[in-house]
Amino acid sequence: MTENLLHNIYLYNPTCDYAIANGSPNWQPNRLLQKMEADLSALPLFFAGKNDFVLVEKMPDEEFIQSMQCINVEIPGFILKNDAIGNKQFLQLPKNMLIPWGWSPAAHQLLFPLKQSCSPGFRQSPVFQWKPEHREISSRKFAIGILNNVRTAINAGYLLPPDHMPKICQNQTDFENAIRQWEKIMVKAPWSSSGRGLQPITKTPVHPKVWEKVMGIVKDQGYAIAEPYLNKVLDLAFLFELKKGKVGFLGFSNFCTSKKGQYEGNYINGLPLNTENEIVEFVNTAGREIREPLMKTIENSKMAIFYEGVFGVDTIIYADEKGKLRINPCLEINVRHTMGMLSLQLEKLLKIGTKAMFRTFYQPGVSFYTFKQKMEKEYPLKIAKNKIASGFLALTCATEDTLFGAYILV
């Protein structure tokens, strides 16, 4: 039986970065994040094939399955996470690969019972067992090293200048020096995701509660990163796949974040129509010139030895003090799946030439079911030849007790 016909097993665990930071195989996210992972647990269905399985906290209902079949989404098998780990028949089922959203000691611990029936190819891959190097390549410190090498390789005037390179801070004096140099800074935890673990410092004197949060990161993770607070114009990510030490380019992800840097959603099928021509041209030029050096730098790094799978490199396009467009070509590396990769898959569901927005939902006190009903009335779904032409579509199940959701708006 070829590995292509074997079953891949998917798991949605976007808290993997926090699990890496903690380091314990028994780490658990807090209750709210557990609820988020549970409500969105079916999302990997957009990566999976019909022979694959997605581990879920709750089985998707028939209404949801039908809504996916209407737009020709291949429906994989779904199996409850707890059943999968304790079901003798499922444990013995010949599998190809285990594909969590991201690897961590906790993900390895959870999926360990399934490893015995995986393919030889997966058993020999660098992600089959957790190693200390996996923690290192997932950190923002590692991304700074890649940034340095990419800057040297390209040497273009539109790159982040040397005096704007991020700094590693281990005490309050380090942060104060960064504030003296740049006035406004963004502090980042070495391991975090979706814009969490970020703290802007834009006013002095710094409020005691802000110092408490910043020094809390240092206490928890050993250090923090300080960067100049930039006048952001656009968020852009390069999406790649690493296999046998070689990097392949998958596409671009155009996403948006809040002023605090938290993830808000992805544009699907390129930048919004109202994007200024100057920005579009800059994205095209910089994207073309940065891609190859970025790929080669990663192929020559530890990441090529210790990782296999998809990953994203976030960049930031910003205006400097003279209004000139510049780019930080490696703001951070997400050594895992990203919402940008999911958005690439969602492009296939749209009518050709259609632009859309992918978003996740969470509003305290409002269920995703209530939100879905409201949006379906305001933006009725129109399907043409099994493709989404316009309207709202929920990409995860919506029930009265669902707090989190994902959707597309065309």
Image: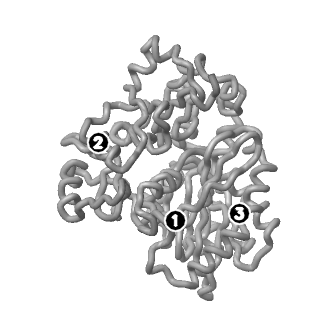
Task: Give the structural element (helix, strand or loop) at label 3.
Answer: helix
**In the picture, residue 250 is in which quadrant?**
bottom right
Where is mark 3, residue-wise?
291
10 Å crowding of disc 2: few (<14), some (14-19), many (20+): few
Amino acid carrying mark 3 in the image: Arg
Relative to 139, is 129 above or below?
Answer: above
Tell me whether circle 1 and circle 2 mark residues in contact (CB < 8 Å).
no
**In whole angstroms, how far apart are the C-alphas of marks 1 and 2?**
29 Å
Q: Earlier along the polypeptide chain: callout 1 or callout 3?
A: 1
Tag 3 near tag 2, CB within 8 Å:
no
Q: Position of residue 137 (x, y in %)?
A: 68, 45
Q: Nearer the viewer, residue 132 or 155?
A: 155
Circle 2 sits on which residue? 66
**Label 1 is placed on what type of residue?**
Asn
Q: Secondary structure at mark 2?
A: helix
- Residue at the disc numbered 1: 254
Look at 42% across and 66% down and name the residue there. Answer: 258
Q: Which quarter of the figure is the N terminus placed in?
A: top right
Q: Is residue 361 left or right of residue 112?
A: left
Residues marked 1 and 3 touching at CB (< 8 Å): no
Q: Earlier in the sequence, mark 1 or mark 2?
A: 2
Question: Which residue is found at the position 59% from the left and 27% from the top?
Answer: 96
Name the outermost residue toward the bottom: 322
Residue at image position (63%, 85%) is: 324
Q: Residues within 10 Å of mark 3 (few under 14, many from 20)?
A: some
